[in-house]
Image (cartoon, grey):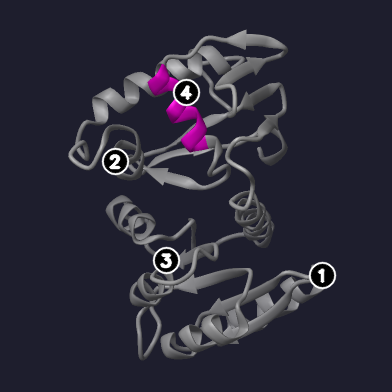
Amino acid sequence: MSARLLLADDELQIGRLLKSVLSAEGYLLQVATDGQTALDLAAKWRPDLILLELRLPVIEGRDVCRRIRDWSQVPIIVLTACDDEDEKVALLDLGADDYITKPFSVRELLARIRVALRHGTQMQRDGGSVVTFGSLQIDRSRRLVTYEGQEIRLTPTEYNLLVLLSGHAGKVLTHRMILRSIWGPHSDHDLNTLRVFVTQLRRKIEADPAHPLLITTEPGVGYRFRPPDRQ
């Protein structure tokens, strides 16, 4: 069955372009040109993914994102003309799964949509299952990690960090999200500790830790786990 996408954007040109492109890709698309309509469609139509412009009339995109997160975990990709790091962090902390900066290429947008849809499906998986990402395998029931068939010895914190990142494969996790999840609610600003553990983890699971491909840095924002099939 075709995935259902909701585009919330009041730029008619963007709406026409994306409707043509996404329909050609086999997606079912609804378009909302203001925030209230976007909320109504999200509740009634139940899309599989939402493309959300921030600058919407009636109700702005940030409030749309916040309200949807009160009742749904549907993947949300924010479309923004803003390239400010603090703004991106704030969006992700609100509950957005990803962001793409305007102007963007259609090819990049389609890739982000595919990743977000896969992530939405992955959230339904059993947390104790064995998951495989290329040469990397994580057995959550046994807390066992192997790379190219060899067991990788991780500390408890390294393991928890890997499970967190890989469990949100393709999604940007902010520093704040990671710190709170691994070290608790009062660790928001302990970035040096996070960097040390990411460096240690990369040394153990990356073919070339100096040029990481699995755990990539989103400068000023956080980290993204990018399995081989999504690079």
Secondary element at tag 3: loop
Q: Position of residue 58 (x, y in %)?
A: 36, 91
Residue 62 versus residue 20: which sits nearer the camera? 62
For marks 2 and 1, give the CA distance: 37 Å
Q: Is residue 93 above or below residue 226?
A: below
Please give the residue where the numbered disc 1 appears in the rendered image.
1
The residue beneath circle 2 is 180
Which numbered disc flags the more N-terminal residue, 4 or 2? 4
Q: CA distance from mark 2 to mark 3?
A: 29 Å
Q: Is residue 146 above or below residue 68?
A: above
Which of the 4 image quadrants contains residue 220? top left
Q: Which of disc 4 and disc 3 is earlier in sequence?
A: 3
Q: Is residue 205 magenta?
A: no
- Asked if the residues shown at circle 4 and circle 2 are in contact, with their CB atoms under 8 angstroms apart, the answer is no
Relative height, residue 53 to residue 137 (above, below): below
Task: Magenta stretch: give its range.
Answer: 156-165
Q: Residue at horizontal 51%, vertical 64%? A: 76
Q: Quadrant of the N terminus?
A: bottom right
Q: Which residue is mark 4?
A: 159
Counting from the top left corner in percent of width and height, residue 229 is at 72, 37
Disc 1 from disc 3: Cα separation: 32 Å
In the picture of the structure, the residue carrying the numbered disc 3 is 81
The quadrant in which residue 231 appears is top right
Please give left or right for residue 129 compared with residue 35 in the image. Answer: right
Looking at the rendered structure, the kind of residue marked 4 is Tyr
